[in-house]
Image (cartoon, rainbow, N blue to C red):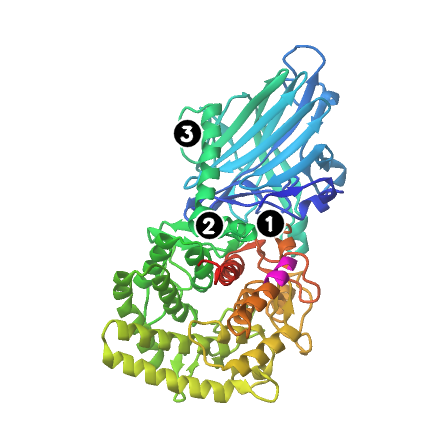
């Protein structure tokens, strides 16, 4: 699936900032700019390097601004941006605090396309320039290739801009930059470069009024600063020529145009292999397979694989990883990565709990999640079903037993199994479910007590353990887990099911929050083992469809509720108060569709309906971040990505739906 954008996507400078690309490097680093090549966020960067994978990230290269100078004869072109200003045509599209400085290079931009890599096609009089950006997987290395097709002479002048500051911080003009021996040094960091252009040293210039409109909309720091201490001249003649610039945090080998071409081809082939390995055939599914892989990264502190929860803001979190893994690793058939991630969590399992955040620089892990450990058991089950790895099952068995034991007798954060067989969790300011936002001393959605999805996960984990115990010939454990599951089911259906209203309560807490209509009830229908019957499932899905369904996600709260917030934006406090109070989340939509398919009377007919409804979600792959699905959208009119523009569990959960659709559509046709 190839994404193509034209001039109607950048009618003005602001419209051109609404969509960006993302290239991940498998370390947590990334490259991301808008479709017009602009920086519209502090976290937009040509090279955001992970100096310690995955979350110690530094904003290294902000951008490379290009300008074209045309010669009427056969001279060598312009040698300095300050010479012959009238002959320069600047191609960058960037906004500044002083609007008169805004650069409108998008006027020369013919198209932007993204299939495997981002490509911009510019036309300046008799010159066509095609710019391609690639990252080398497993390295903090960015490659920028410029193909010039010209019928005359001229010069492409490239001005790199740097920051060398931790991600999210702002460069100060007191920071110095040194250019020496094919490297730039600043802030104790070194950035190596190679180019076939001519490097012209200049005094460091600071641009301190970059304007980030998308950050301004979220109440974040809207002003940026970058520095430049050299330019690169690329003189061209009639015909086709390639110029390149490569930046890396590691010393580069001797490279040439062929090296760049080979690295670009290698990255494209790597992505093609991901698609082939998945076996999925839907164009949208293949896009999501490639996108899903961008969340898989190395973690230096554990020497294993992990997952970035979302770009550009988040790191790797336990709960998000367990929710995203089913689609991003198992559906994508990245089984080695799945096992590496699971082993990491096994090593850090403590008192039956899985980390929500991993240690950095010797810090202890943080365990404030009630769901990660229960979802771990589900992922082990899905993994073992997918690849039949009985050896890993035996390896994971003691860890899973410890989870059930600790949850049964009680563990940290007031997590325990009550006398009715249901799991209760949380007190005070503890944030333990995915609706975990805290604004000062306010928990907008505390959900202390017995949350519906946690108890759906608990029952599912008990049934999986009963199944695994049988396979491992542990009859005593099988009987124990089976009896616990039966008790949990009886209490769950008695206490959560509202026969009159036709939906599941969100939490058992003795507060008004109990009867709020939320999307969490969907997961009671989607686990490998579930408790509601067919009639209940249909009524739950009808309620969800009526109150919560949108084509781009499920609302986190019914619009009929007094606490509903229909829009998300503004200052941090305002965003926090709306985050789980009606804001649309994309990842529960995957659970909703999976439930629809699971509980349908006519599976093939329902698959056709889901496929048709999913078509309405395809435009979101074009919006926000190309080929990705965002974290959240407004509850009232979900049409513009909010929060992280690329979210792992959004991509993973929708990818699972495409896999299920293809399985249903193939059934009965393989004979």
Residue closest to the far top? 74
Tell me the residue at 65%/11% (across/down): 75
Q: Are marks 2 and 1 in contact (CB under 8 Å)?
A: no
Rounded to the nearest angstrom, the CA distance separating label 2 from label 1 is 15 Å
Residue pointed to by mark 2: 293
Residue closer to the observer: 19 or 607: 607
Tag 3 secondary structure: loop
Tag 2 secondary structure: helix
Q: Magenta: predominant secondary structure element?
A: helix
Answer left or right for 93 relative to 182: right
Q: Are marks 1 and 3 in contact (CB under 8 Å)?
A: no
Residue closer to the observer: 433 or 337: 337
Place of residue 386 in the rendered image (x, y in percent of width and height, measured from the top left) = 37, 61
Tell me the residue at 40%/27% (across/down): 253
Residue closest to the far front? 671
Which quarter of the rendering shows the C terminus? Answer: bottom left
**Mark 2 or mark 1, which is nearer to you?**
2
Residue closer to the observer: 494 or 78: 494
Residue pointed to by mark 3: 252
Which segment is the magenta one?
611-616
Q: Quadrant of residue 402?
A: bottom left
Does 473 appear above or below 646? Answer: below
Residue 476 belongs to the span the image colors magenta: no
Residue pointed to by mark 1: 625
Q: Which mark is residue 223?
A: none
Q: Quadrant of residue 5?
A: top right
Badge 2 or badge 1: first in the primary sequence:
2
Residue closer to the observer: 306 or 192: 306
Place of residue 88 in the rendered image (x, y in percent of width and height, measured from the top left) = 71, 23
Tag 1 secondary structure: loop
Q: Residues within 10 Å of mark 2 (few under 14, many from 20)?
A: many
């Amino acid at each position: 699936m190839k994404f193509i954008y034209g001039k109607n996507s950048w009618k003005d400078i602001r419209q051109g900032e609404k969509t960006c690309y993302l290239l991940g490097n498998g370390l947590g680093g990334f490259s991301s700019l808008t479709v017009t090549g602009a920086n519209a966020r502090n976290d937009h960067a040509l090279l955001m390097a992970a100096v310690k994978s995955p979350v110690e990230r530094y904003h290294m290269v902000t951008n490379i601004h290009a300008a074209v100078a045309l010669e009427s004869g056969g001279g060598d072109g312009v040698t300095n941006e300050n010479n012959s200003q009238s002959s320069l045509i600047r191609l960058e599209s960037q906004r500044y605090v002083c609007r008169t400085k805004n650069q409108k290079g998008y006027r020369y931009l013919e198209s932007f396309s993204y299939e495997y890599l981002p490509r911009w096609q510019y036309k300046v009089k008799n010159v066509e320039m095609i710019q391609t950006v690639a990252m080398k997987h497993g390295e903090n290395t960015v490659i920028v290739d410029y193909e010039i097709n010209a019928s005359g002479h001229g010069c492409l002048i490239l001005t790199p801009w740097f920051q060398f500051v931790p991600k999210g911080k702002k460069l100060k003009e007191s920071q110095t930059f040194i250019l020496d021996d094919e490297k730039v040094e600043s802030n104790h960091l070194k950035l190596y470069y190679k180019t076939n252009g001519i490097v012209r040293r200049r005094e460091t210039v600071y641009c301190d009024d970059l304007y980030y409109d998308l950050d301004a909309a979220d109440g974040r720091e809207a002003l940026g600063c970058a520095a430049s201490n050299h330019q690169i001249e690329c003189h061209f003649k009639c015909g086709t020529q390639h110029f390149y610039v490569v930046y890396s945090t590691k010393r580069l080998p001797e490279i040439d145009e062929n090296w760049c071409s080979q690295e670009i081809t290698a990255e494209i082939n790597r992505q093609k292999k991901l698609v082939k390995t998945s076996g999925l055939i839907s164009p949208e599914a293949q896009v999501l397979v490639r996108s899903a892989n961008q969340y898989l990264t190395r973690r230096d502190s554990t020497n294993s694989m992990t997952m970035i929860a979302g770009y550009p803001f988040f790191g790797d979190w336990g709960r998000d990883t367990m929710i995203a893994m089913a689609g991003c690793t198992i559906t994508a058939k990245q089984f080695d990565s799945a096992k590496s991630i699971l082993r990491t969590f096994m090593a850090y399992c403590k008192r039956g709990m899985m980390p929500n955040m991993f240690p950095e620089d010797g810090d202890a892990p943080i365990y404030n999640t009630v769901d990660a450990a229960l979802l771990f058991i589900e992922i082990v089950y899905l993994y073992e079903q997918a690849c039949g790895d009985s050896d890993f099952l035996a390896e994971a068995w003691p860890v899973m037993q410890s989870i059930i034991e600790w949850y049964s007798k009680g563990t940290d954060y007031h997590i325990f199994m009550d006398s009715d067989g249901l799991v209760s969790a949380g007190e005070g300011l503890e944030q333990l479910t995915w609706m975990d936002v805290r604004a000062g001393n306010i928990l907008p959605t505390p959900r202390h007590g017995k949350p519906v999805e946690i108890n759906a996960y608990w029952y599912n984990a008990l049934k999986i353990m009963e199944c695994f115990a049988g396979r491992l010939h542990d009859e005593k454990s099988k009987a124990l887990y089976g009896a616990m599951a039966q008790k949990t089911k009886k209490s769950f259906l008695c206490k959560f099911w509202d026969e009159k209203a036709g939906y599941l309560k969100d939490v058992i807490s003795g507060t008004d929050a109990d009867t709020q209509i939320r999307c969490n009830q969907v997961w009671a229908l989607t686990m490998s083992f579930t408790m509601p019957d067919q009639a209940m499932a249909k009524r739950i899905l009808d309620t969800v469809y009526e109150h919560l369904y949108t084509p781009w996600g499920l609302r986190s709260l019914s619009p009929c509720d007094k606490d509903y917030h229909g829009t998300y934006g503004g200052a941090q406090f305002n965003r926090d108060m709306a985050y789980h109070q009606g804001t649309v989340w994309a990842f529960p939509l995957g659970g909703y569709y999976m439930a629809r398919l699971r509980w349908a009377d006519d599976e093939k007919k329902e698959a056709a309906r889901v496929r048709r409804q999913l078509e309405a979600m395809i435009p979101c792959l074009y919006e926000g971040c190309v080929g990705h699905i965002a974290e959240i959208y407004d509850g009232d009119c979900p049409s513009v990505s909010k929060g992280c523009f690329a979210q792992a569990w959004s991509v993973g959960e929708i990818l699972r739906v495409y896999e299920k659709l293809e399985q249903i559509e193939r059934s009965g046709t393989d004979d």
